[in-house]
Image: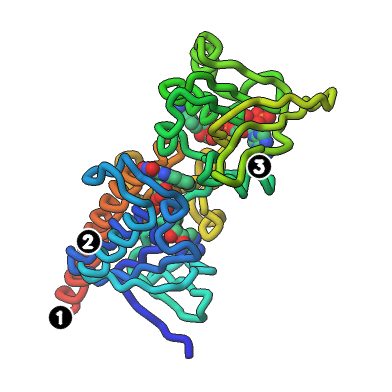
Amino acid sequence: MSETHHTKVLIIGSGPAGYTAGVYAARAMLSPILVQGMEPGGQLTTTTEVENYPGFTEVQGPELMVKMQDHAAAMGTTIIQDIITDLDLTKRPFTARGDSGDIYTADSVILATGARAKWLGLPSEDKFKGFGVSACATCDGFFYREKNIVVVGGGNTAVEEALFLTNFGQKVTLIHRRDELRAEKILQNRLFKHPKVEVLWDHTIDEIVGTDMPMGVTGVRARHVKTGAITEVPADGVFIAIGHAPASELVKDVLELHNGGYVKVEPGTTRTSIPGVFAAGDLTDHVYRQAVTSAGMGCMAALDAEKFIAEMDDVTETVVTEIA
Ligand code: FAD
Ligand code: NAP
């Protein structure tokens, strides 16, 4: 039997942004409902060691997310395993429909559906994810001290990741499918000047090669896009940096977006183009994309929602008083 739930604050997403919004909204006595989605705990559940979340010199990603979930629940957030499939933001209360058939009505909505790194789609890439293949240099660069590193991509992210990885690796090879980069000139100049960096132009990756015992990467097989010639590049770590896709499908036709699908918010706030709808975390952030920044924005979203609801209540009270 499907149910209808009403809440002052509906939080969609269970990554660091969603759970932090839950902690703050619950402590503001707003009795929030948080819908977890298809990946309870979000992106950090797909990684192992996290070494840059304040308070933890090292914590497993899934463990950190269980702690955040427990924290949000302990403060009074109702956590529901469901996936929002439709969201009507055209009138208040806002209405969301779950995959379970349940309906959620809400005075305000916090969108925290995150973003996904784009992958090449190779079976060998899948096989070595977490064992030498990564999409996050900030998270995993530290594991490749004095090692050979390959970065794939030609945009700002790829060049920034390659430059960052020079802090760790003995050599960084950037492999790009064309003969010019998309990245900003200033970043390109820094890259080309760097003694540890080599660029392999006009190449795509055919296969990431490695060993099963122990599970690890030993290199990539790259193909020249014009001649078809194969080059084997030795590597211990392969960073795929071909862009991120924000999970904004639910709202892409109703909210203002920027930079290829990220939800636009008023600078310094989490307010979207619809009053009462807030966005936090990787869904709105194409620059930082970190657990701690997402958590920070989750806090901001809950505070913004609290203010919005208080103002809504003030208006209702004034109308009631005037009628009386
Ligand atoms: P996400 O974590 O992406 O969570 C999104 C949530 O939205 C998920 O729970 C999903 O189920 C839910 N959702 C999506 N669609 C729906 C829907 N329709 N209905 C309901 N729910 C929905 N950052 C660091 O700071 N340190 C690290 O070491 C680090 N390591 C990383 C390693 C890997 C492999 C990856 C991929 C990322 C890593 N990051 C790291 C980045 C970090 O994970 C993200 O910045 C952070 O998780 C973003 O949090 P978020 O809450 O915005 O969204
Ligand atoms: P991007 O600009 O979309 O670049 C993606 C790169 O990956 C492109 O060079 C693209 O090649 C390549 N690519 C895409 N799919 C590929 C595939 N299947 N195989 C091989 N290569 C592939 O993505 P981004 O670099 O993540 O940047 C996203 C947005 O964030 C941009 O607006 C960017 O400016 C912004 N950003 C800004 C900063 C900053 O300001 N410091 C930092 C990071 C990101 P082609 O060039 O051939 O298309």
Among numbered discs 3 and 1, the one appearing first in the sequence: 3
Q: Is residue 208 left or right of residue 285?
A: right
Q: Point out the frontmost of discs 2 and 1.
A: 2
What amino acid type is highlighted by mark number 2? Glu
Q: Are marks 2 and 1 in contact (CB under 8 Å)?
A: no
| Image vertical order of residue 64 relative to residue 282, above or below | below
Return the residue at label 1.
324
User: Which is closer to the viewer, label 3 or label 2?
Assistant: 3
Q: Nearer the viewer, residue 58 or 82?
A: 58
**Left or right of residue 211, residue 227 in this image:** right
What residue appears at the point 38 percent right and 73 percent down from the top-left corner?
80
Q: Residue furthest right?
A: 227
Q: Does mark 3 have its CB less than 8 Å from ligand 2?
A: yes
Residue 32: tell me if it is visible: yes
Q: Residue at x 31, y 67 (%)?
A: 9
Q: Secondary structure at mark 3?
A: loop
Amino acid identity at mark 1 = Ala
Looking at the rendered structure, the secondary structure element under dot 2 is helix
Horizontal side, residue 222 vs residue 145: left or right: right
Instruction: Indicate the position of residue 45 as horizontal and vertical percent values.
Output: 43, 55
Position of residue 309 measured from the top left corner of the image (x, y, whole percent): 25, 64
> Does 230 sit left or right of 23 as displayed?
right
Q: Nearer the viewer, residue 233 or 308?
A: 233
Q: Looking at this rendering, what residue extends furthest in the front direction? A: 213
Residue 311: give its label: 2
Identify the amino acid type marked 3: Leu
Image location (x, y in percent) of residue 206 = 73, 36
Q: Quick check: is the Cβ at mark 1 less than 8 Å away from ligand 1?
A: no
Residue that badge 3 annotates = 120
Of the two numbered discs 2 and 1 on the same chain, state the one appearing first in sequence: 2
Tag 1, which secondary structure? loop
